[in-house]
Image (tube, grey):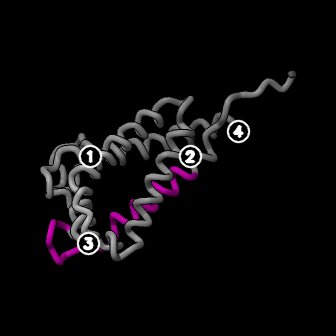
Amino acid sequence: MRGLRHLVSWLLALFLIFMFLQATVHPLPNPPEGMVKLFDRPGENIVFQTMADKTGLYWLEPAGRVAVAIIELLICLLLLIPYSRRFGAVLAFLLLAGAVMAHLSPDILGRDVPVSVGASETDGGRLFALSIAMLASSMLLIFAHPGKRRNPFR
């Protein structure tokens, strides 16, 4: 049973790490325009520019975007190390809960995110569904990651 929990823990952690890296630095070729947090020019990130426009909090783009990107990279590092994986999963859960809340509020972001800054065409809720999948994965990781092995003979 413990071996299965280790396997599930690694799979969930690798999924979360891959998704956070995709959104933050996008290691694969041809990243989508306006979807890479650390390498978009100010005002070009679709999600954070939309939130800044809807809320009037213009510090969200680029300062908020860079702060979230740094937190995501820290979470990736914590998820990679087994001893800190549960703490990383808790941080990921909190960050993703905020993302889902932003998607659920039409005054902040909304479920349908525009495909480009200022466009009327939307993604059909794919980014919202991905946020929910990552939130569920982080919650599962919190409970699935095996803790320290206790000595039964103490």
Q: Earlier in the sequence, mark 4 or mark 1?
A: 4
**Gap between marks 1 and 3 measured at Cα:** 19 Å
On the rendered image, what quadrant is the N terminus found in? top right
**Gap between marks 3 and 2 measured at Cα:** 33 Å
**Gap between marks 4 and 3 measured at Cα:** 48 Å
Which is more foreground, mark 4 or mark 3?
A: 3
Segment colored magenta: 115-139
Q: Secondary structure at mark 2?
A: helix
Q: Earlier in the sequence, mark 1 or mark 3?
A: 3
Report if residue 122 lies within the magenta region.
yes
Q: Which residue is mark 4?
A: 1
Tell me which amino acid carries mark 2. Leu
Q: Earlier in the sequence, mark 2 or mark 1?
A: 1
Give the number of the disc on residue 45. Answer: none
Q: Which residue is mark 3?
A: 54
Residue at image x 24%, y 68%? 56
Residue 32: x and y in percent read 18, 55
